[in-house]
Amino acid sequence: MKVFFKEFTISTSERFQVINITSYVEEAVKESGIRNGICLVFVPHATAAIIANEYEPNIVSDYIELVRQVFKPDYAWRHNRIDNNAHAHLASAVIGPSRIFPVREGRIVRGTWQEILLVELDGPRPRRRVMVEVMGE
Ligand code: ZN
């Protein structure tokens, strides 16, 4: 079994932002030379998340609205006494910092409407790290 690792950085410009990182991940899989296996996409951050879903302006606004409605940035969360970003930690905890994809014949397997998206929950941040690990043969 072969293991390939690649890291790239993304800078975000908004407090809440959805960034399509599909091409970066697909490039990493191509570079790995691995034909069949799995691909892990992971962010080592407690206030960001990874999702696999449609990337279209309305649904992108809806993802952000969902985060606002469910995780309520203005609520008096206890953690807000420390650095005012409890909503971002909670959303990251629930959505999750990673997704795993099958790799078949050198390509990530994903549905037509499944783009790989980085969700910024506490931006802007100059340097969000995204790690891609490809394992297989
Ligand atoms: Zn915090």
Image (cartoon, rainbow, N blue to C red):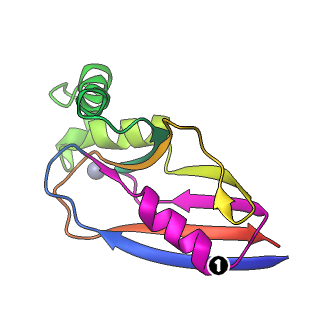
Q: Quadrant of residue 18?
A: top left
Residue found at the far top of this picture: 69
Q: Is mark 1 within 8 Å of ligand 1?
A: no
Q: Quadrant of the N terminus?
A: bottom right
- Position of the C terminus by quadrant: bottom right
Residue plotted at (58% across, 38% down): 111
Judged left or right of residue 121, residue 92 is right
Disc 1 marks which residue? 32
Give the x, y percent position of residue 4.
Answer: 66, 79
| In-image side of 18 versus 26 (left or right) | left
Taking depth in this image into account, of 39 and 46 the one nearest to the observer is: 39
Point out the stretch of residues depicted in magenta. Answer: 18-46
Drawn side of residue 38 relative to residue 53, left or right: right
Tell me if residue 89 is in the magenta stretch: no
The residue shown at (23%, 34%) is 57
* Residue 128 at x, y percent in the picture: 32, 65
Which residue is nearer to you in this view: 78 or 116?
116
Amino acid beneath label 1: Ser
Looking at the image, residue 14 lies above or below residue 10: above
| Residue 35 among those drawn in magenta | yes
What percent of the width, then of the height, locates residue 63?
Answer: 32, 30
Label 1: element kind: helix
Residue 107 figure quarter: bottom right
Q: Nearer the viewer, residue 48 or 74?
A: 48
